[in-house]
Image: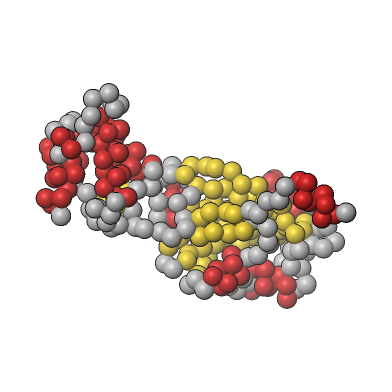
Amino acid sequence: MVDLIREILAQENWTRKQNGPLYVQLHDQIESAIRAGDIKPGEPLPSERVMAEISKVSRITVRKAVQTLVNDGLVVQKQGSGTSVAPKIDKVQQSLSQLTSFSEDMARRGAIARSRLLEKGLTTPSPRETVALGLGANSKVARISRLRIVDGVPLAIERASISPEYLPDPENVGHSLYEYLAKLGHKPSRAIQRISASNISSADAKLLQVEEGVAGLNIERTSYLPSGQVVEFTRSIYRGDAYDFVAELQLAEQLESDEQ
């Protein structure tokens, strides 16, 4: 492995004139080795000093190359244990055309899913929760926050807010929020989701086991009862390297013909 790393980092194997800054070329060389499987998931990279000596460039150049690899999600840095190739993660795909809970979605896939509870109970709502749920001036809000884990990998943080009119006892919610709401006769029938890109904050990055600032997906979902009343307002952050959302689209002409 040491000889292979030396061959990969040897400057004559990756520097090309007119191919951009050295740190970009070094980044591209290491990325190619990772994607080709020459450096496998979980394997450590040499220290910054050693990489600089092998590649005959400055430590600043190595640092910039490694940081771009971190930003790309290809390597991870942990204090005290150095830099290593990021573990391989099979992306989870979720349809945007169906309203399902995380538990239901993972069960259909046969995945081993579990949740780590972060917060559960009745509390004073934020202004945003008050507006989203149409809460009264002195009302409480039922709040349930969970870290979602699939096959041992943390994928998302879900922060659900529900009016106590529909969820008066959040402490009794078990594995599935939607399953419990169904027992109470308040399961959502439709929802509106807004998806946006974001950089994961320091606190969320620790929970999701990624570097601070890496790409993530912000999901805001407002769910409705058949009566049209808002029942749930959920804000989630998903790992960008582990989750894909898929939507089925039809041409407008086809939709019009189907409606006639």
Horizontal side, residue 110 vs residue 36: left or right: right
> In this view, which residue lies farthest toward the bottom?
183
Number of numbered discs on residues:
0
Up-down relation of residue 20 to residue 191 (above or below)? above
Q: Nearer the viewer, residue 170 or 53?
A: 53
Horizontal side, residue 251 vs residue 118: left or right: right
Quarter that holds the N terminus: bottom left
Image point 15% across, 50% down: which residue? 4
Q: Position of residue 113 (x, y in %)?
A: 50, 70
Up-down relation of residue 208 to residue 11 (above or below)? below
Image point 59% across, 43% down: which residue? 196
Q: Position of residue 166 (x, y in %)?
A: 76, 65
Horizontal side, residue 190 vs residue 26: left or right: right
Q: Position of residue 186 (x, y in %)?
A: 76, 68
Image point 13% across, 45% down: which residue? 6
Q: Is residue 96 visible?
A: yes
Q: Is residue 52 visible?
A: no
Q: Position of residue 235 (x, y in %)?
A: 61, 52
Q: Nearer the viewer, residue 206 or 226?
A: 226
Up-down relation of residue 102 to residue 217 (above or below)? below
Q: Nearer the viewer, residue 137 or 70?
A: 70
Up-down relation of residue 236 to residue 11 (above or below)? below
The scheme the figure's colours follow is secondary structure
Q: Quadrant of residue 171?
A: bottom right
> In this view, which residue lies farthest toward the right?
260
Image point 68% across, 58% down: which residue? 97
Quarter that holds the C terminus: bottom right
